[in-house]
Image: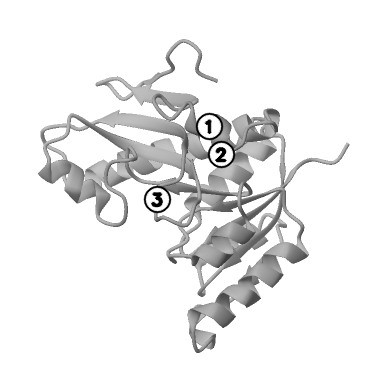
């Protein structure tokens, strides 16, 4: 029986892509990465290639506008016939046309507890608001930025001494746990769709938390 196929989109180091690959290797995620695609020269491509994973570069700067870039990107993605497309630090706002094309196949990880802090600078915004907790969310991608139904979240306490950098580091550590777990949830429950998950938005289907000492806490019912 063939494993469900993933295509992962990155723009930088690819640390979440690496976490997904490691989860596959150790049996936590029953899937196969068909390819990792970047929109610019990215260190993550070499890291994935070193693991024997196909990589592709579709450089945004080579196109005169977003539409031809997205047509080329869509063509490359579809050449791998993925079951899911995972945005993992992909730093492009995608058009409604592309998002609709991949409806219910495209997920993203965002460094905030959505619906809080859509967009950029999430760690600084959480600190400025004196939030007691911060974290990351995996959600379905819909045409409205960072507004799709939430699939899973990981929470971290905000410490009095936190800076944007220290908070970002702790959130990223939990992203590396959260994203593979959320993908596994989707793959093991293929009947889930946008409408099913939207019913569970509060709370999300999977909710991971850390206590003040930084230890993982999984509430009853967590996967």
User: How many labels, in total?
Assistant: 3
- From mark 3 to mark 2, how far is it between C-alphas? 14 Å
Q: Name the residue rendered at 63%, 49% in the picture.
A: 105
Q: Mark 2 points at which residue?
A: 194
| Mark 3 in CB contact with mark 2 (< 8 angstroms) | no
> Where is residue 186 drawn, in percent x and y?
63, 34
- Identify the residue under disc 3: 146
Mark 1 crowdedness (10 Å alpha carbons): few <14, some 14-19, many ≥20: some
Q: Is residue 164 visible?
A: no
In this picture the colour scheme is one colour
Say which quadrant the C terminus sits in. top right
Q: Where is residue 97 in the image (x, y as percent from the top left)?
A: 56, 66
- Label 3's element? loop
The residue under the point 64% across, 30% down is 28
Q: Earlier in the sequence, mark 1 or mark 3?
A: 3
In the current view of this chain or complex, which residue is farthest to the top?
220
* 3D distance between C-alphas at marks 1 and 3: 15 Å
- Quarter of the rendering occupied by the N terminus: top right
């Amino acid at each position: 029986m063939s494993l469900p196929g993933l295509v992962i989109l990155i723009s930088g180091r690819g640390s979440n892509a690496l976490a997904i690959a490691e989860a596959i290797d150790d049996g936590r995620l029953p899937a196969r990465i068909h390819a990792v695609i970047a929109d610019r020269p990215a260190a993550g491509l070499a890291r994935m290639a070193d693991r024997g994973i196909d990589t592709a570069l579709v450089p945004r700067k080579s196109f005169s506008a977003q539409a031809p870039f997205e047509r080329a990107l869509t063509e490359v993605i579809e050449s791998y016939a993925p079951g899911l497309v995972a945005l993992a630090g992909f730093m492009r706002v995608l058009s409604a046309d592309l998002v609709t094309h991949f409806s219910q196949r495209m997920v993203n990880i965002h460094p905030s507890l959505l619906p809080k802090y859509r967009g950029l600078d999430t760690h600084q915004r959480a600190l400025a608001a004196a939030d007691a907790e911060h974290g990351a969310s995996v959600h379905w991608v819909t045409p409205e930025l960072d507004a799709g139904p939430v699939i899973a979240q990981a929470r971290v306490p905000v410490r009095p001494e936190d800076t944007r950098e220290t908070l970002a580091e702790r959130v990223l550590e939990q992203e590396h746990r959260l994203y593979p777990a959320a993908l596994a949830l989707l793959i093991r429950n293929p009947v889930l769709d946008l409408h099913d998950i939207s019913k569970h938005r509060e709370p999300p289907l999977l909710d991971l938390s850390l206590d003040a000492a930084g230890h993982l806490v999984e509430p009853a019912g967590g996967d």
